[in-house]
Image (cartoon, grey):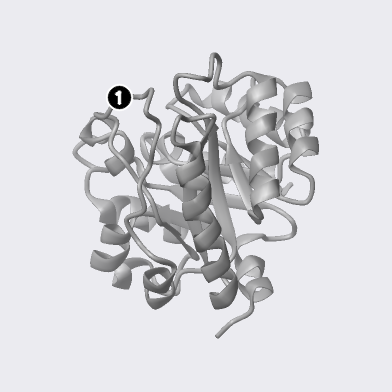
Amino acid sequence: MKSKSSHLGKLVRNGKVLILAMDQGMEHGPKDFDERNINPEYVIDIACKGGFTGFAIQKGIAKHYKENYSGKVPLVLKLNGKTNIAPKDEAYSPPIASVKEAAALGADAVGYTIYVGSPREAEMFREFGKIQEEADDYGLPTVVWAYPRGKYVPDEKSVEMVSYAARVALELGADIVKINYPGSVDGMRKVVAAAGRTKVISAGGSKQPDAEFLQKVRDIMAGGACGLAVGRNVWQNENPMKITQEIKKIVFG
């Protein structure tokens, strides 16, 4: 069994992280896809050829397409998930895979979504506590998708709320926290400070014009983040490999 530092060394390259995410099929549904990227093989090919430090997917994709990505890009297996059909106020993402399954699939890290401030926050904390303990036993780093969400959260992308979510990830023991960009370089600095020694990466968000998105990446990095988990801005792009290279220039310098 590899040590956590060995797995983390794959995910973090020279202190930077660039994950290609394709958990949108469950989280957002088919509306995010077109006739090309609806095929997981199309996105997996981008993950493998693009030089990403990680590929975040749910277990079904990981099981059915293992031969496409195994040994070519580090796997970050999402251990929970939900659809966007259920009421947003409830803000709960149930466990759908185990750390044991992640290890069997050759994962280099496990991912888990926690909705900070949700009415079901305590439940998610308990579930993640068990996952954190098991992940340590297997030597797997944890990546927490930390999003303030639910009926008690007035503005889920405010600097205050995003900073709180980042701090929660640190307090829960996450190695890396994925947050939503709080809207400014100064805001990003506050989020990074709140996260302490937990590495901060930003979500790429919905598809934007290339120039606009690349400026956002510059601001994310200027704010002290160590990278991104990007999905739609790459695999929805007309030229995914070109935009990937532009992102890498900014993230890795």
Residue at the limit of the structure toward the left, as seen here: 35
Quadrant assignment for the N terminus = bottom right
Relative height, residue 146 to residue 111 (above, below): above
Q: Amino acid at mark 1?
A: Pro
Query: How many discs mark residues in the rendered view?
Result: 1
Q: Nearer the viewer, residue 38 or 95?
A: 95
Q: Nearer the viewer, residue 3 or 183?
A: 3
Residue at the limit of the structure toward the top, as seen here: 154
Image coordinates for residue 48, horizontal then vertical, percent? 43, 61
What residue lies at 38% left-to-right and 51% top-to-bottom?
80
Q: Residue 249: in sight, yes or no? A: no
Q: Quadrant of residue 91?
A: top left
Q: In the figure, is residue 192 to the left or right of 61?
A: right
What residue lies at 56% left-to-right and 21% top-to-bottom?
212
Relative height, residue 61 to residue 236 (above, below): below
What residue lies at 39% left-to-right and 37% top-to-bottom?
92
Image coordinates for residue 244, horizontal then vertical, percent? 52, 44
Image coordinates for residue 163, horizontal then vertical, percent? 69, 30
Question: Is label 1 in a helix, a strand or a loop?
Answer: loop
Relative height, residue 180 to residue 125 (above, below): above
- Residue of label 1: 87
* Within-10-Å neighbours for mark 1: few <14, some 14–19, many 20+: few
Q: Quadrant of residue 251?
A: top right
Image coordinates for residue 49, horizontal then vertical, percent? 45, 59
